[in-house]
Amino acid sequence: MIWKIVFILFYFHTILCLNEVRWCTISDPENKKCNDMKAAFGQAKITPMLSCVNGKSGMDCARMIMNNEADAVTLNGELIYQAGSQYNLKPVAGEVYDQGMGTSYYAVAVVRKNSSYTINNLKGAKSCHTGFQRTAGWNVPIGYLIDSGRIAVVACNIQKAVSSFFSQSCVPGSTQADLCQLCIGDANGTNVCDLNGRYSDYSGAFRCLVEGQGDVAFIKHSTVAENSDGKNTDSWAREVISSDYQLLCRDGSHADISEWRQCNLARVPAHAVMTRTNTDGSLIYKMLQDGQQKYNIHSSGFRMFDSSAYNSNNLLFRDMTTELRATGNQTYQAWLGDDYLQAMKGINCDPDKLPKSLRWCTLSTPEIWKCADMARVFKDKNLDPSLQCVSADSPEACMELIRQKEVDAVTLDGGDVYKAGKTYGLVPAAGESYPETNLSSSYYAVALVRRDPLNAFTIHDLKGKKSCHTGYERTAGWNVPIGALIKLGSIRPDECNTAKAVANFFSGSCVPGANQKNFPPELCKLCKGDSKGQNKCEKDTREQYFGYSGAFRCLAEKAGDVAFVKHATVFELTDGQSTESWAKNLKSSDFQLLCPNGARAEVSQYPDCNWAQVPAHAVMVHPDTNIHAVYGLLANAQEYYGNDNSSQFKMFDSSSYNANDLIFKDSTYKIVPVQEKKTYSQWLGSGYLESLEGMQCSSSAAKLRVNITFLLISALLLITFSV
């Protein structure tokens, strides 16, 4: 107990009693300026007192601060991200610049007016950059393109990925020759990829665009205005007119150069003074505030925001700083802003932190066969990380293995994505995209029936019918239709027993995965099992009525009256599209859809006759997993094996294994990035999430009733015994 009290006292002493601020410097000139600032502050009796300690770099200073060997350092945006994420530091004061922008500027992508390029079709364009690892010219645009999935990176080799994405580039300072093809070096044509070349920095990158070398320039928002309309008298800029150029917006549109506040890649935060989270930042800011009031640009002696006396630039603070402004209680994430933060996550790739192999969770024998073949062909193409295959008994078992970091990835449908995110804390790393619609990463859940003029029942006549489902708690096959029927009042669960209510509503069903203890046997009544009649109602391909094709087969073979599937299922398995013996003679015109409004519709009318628009399947991983590495592997792999004409291996075809939808759905057109949908709730979308949560029976109410009953019984017993 005593040691706890001592720890608490020490903790609050650290927060409340900061008698000295140890400023971390990273060079001799900076240390000299720091000691001069210490003397000036001391002369002015500014508190807390200032002292200076030496660090090797900005990140070394961040480490020293975390270890309580220093208290403060000024860092740029990239280092703020690293110091915050790795060392849990926070900003206490931000620099303000005389740009009319306060504590930030904007990174933008500029093209010539009427250019056909947008942010969505830059692949193959020629690009101009301020410099390798520069903020507006590299970190923000490349980080954004990686984070949004436009550039796929393998094994953290970002320069190689960029050189493959753009046809030619000028990235001054790059270590890869392919990224210097557009550079022209100095006035003598030498030092082609040098950071001091004619196409380097903001004006140089814009010049690269102006002179027709590049198609897009990544610069800051003020660059065009500073180098056009007569403001720059250099020969290359004299005739430049700002209205001849436009900005590329994140939504795919163009905008005038003056609209950079609304059309940009990210707001780049100003440099900020960083300290530990358990340090009272207001004391550090008070010291700086008192200092800048006395030692500003008008001071005749020491000047905080001027490094000329030390024959250097930007010591302690940037020389263009006009004042330091308190950040309040902002976290480093809030200071950086969402757009910049996401760009940093895209560009921040450490090869040493990548998994040496990606362990994929499989759910059946055919699936592990396909996974093994996939691992082999990936290795043939030297795709990284390598693939390993792990077998599990259920999606939930995969989720638990991923949570424990014993497995890395599994592909799940919407219902399981919900469970994986909500219960196991997993996140989406990539998603499937389907060619049947323009929705890219979503599809429709529909109720499919046979065309029968003599028995054209509707949604209102479903009670007593026989139903075919893709699987228990599967999205299109269970969650959406049962949720809709509950919402309509057709199915009314008693005491949260949805399974029992469904069994009472339909006269018989096949719900693979409903072969659970205390579940009504009627839910497995129509199931067929494997070719030997065994493994009936299993939630995998051993059950012939499992999944989309299985539920449709259940309907086609007249075991059921209605099949709850996705809209594309009927097109994939009729009109000669399937070679399966049970499906090869089926016609799509023999089937219809049941609409929620009580009508019937043709199968082609699914956009207007569906039960919900649902998200595509997603590859789910542990939140510590680098999602860009996972997507990068799959995106590069599908270049070789994503086409159904591939002779070696087909990622999106399971027919060779006498099964369907192994690892990925067979209807998948390509693997797509999650972009901004980086959580399970963002991937599922608010509309679908609401319908899914509507399926979650009010167990809390049931528990409340149980608790009230228990309390009443307890009260009665107490009264009885007291009497």
Image (cartoon, rainbow, N blue to C red):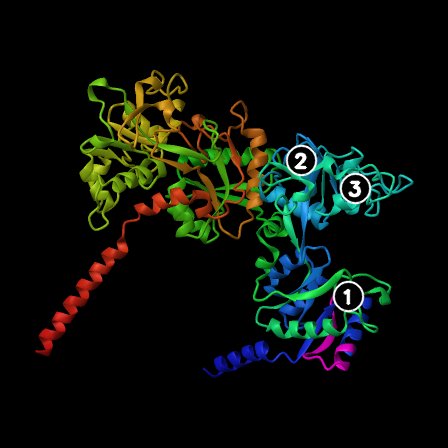
Residue 55 seen in this snapshot? yes
Q: Where is residue 546 drawn, in percent x and y?
A: 33, 33
Closer to the camera in the image, 27 or 352: 27
Q: Earlier in the sequence, mark 2 or mark 1?
A: 2
Q: What stretch is highlighted in magenta?
A: 40-56
Give the amino acid type for the residue marked by disc 3 in the picture.
Ser
Residue shown at 49%/38% (left/top)?
A: 431
Q: Can residue 156 be seen in this view?
A: no
Q: Nearer the viewer, residue 566 or 215?
A: 215
Q: Where is residue 231 in the image (x, y as percent from the top left)?
A: 81, 45
Point out the image quarter for the N terminus. bottom left
The residue where tag 1 is placed is 305
Q: Which of marks 1 and 3 is in front?
A: 3
Q: Residue furthest bottom?
A: 2
Mark seen at residue 228? 3
Q: What residue type is labelled 1?
A: Phe
User: Would you call the spot at circle 3 few (<14 residues within 10 Å), some (14-19), or many (20 or more)?
Assistant: some
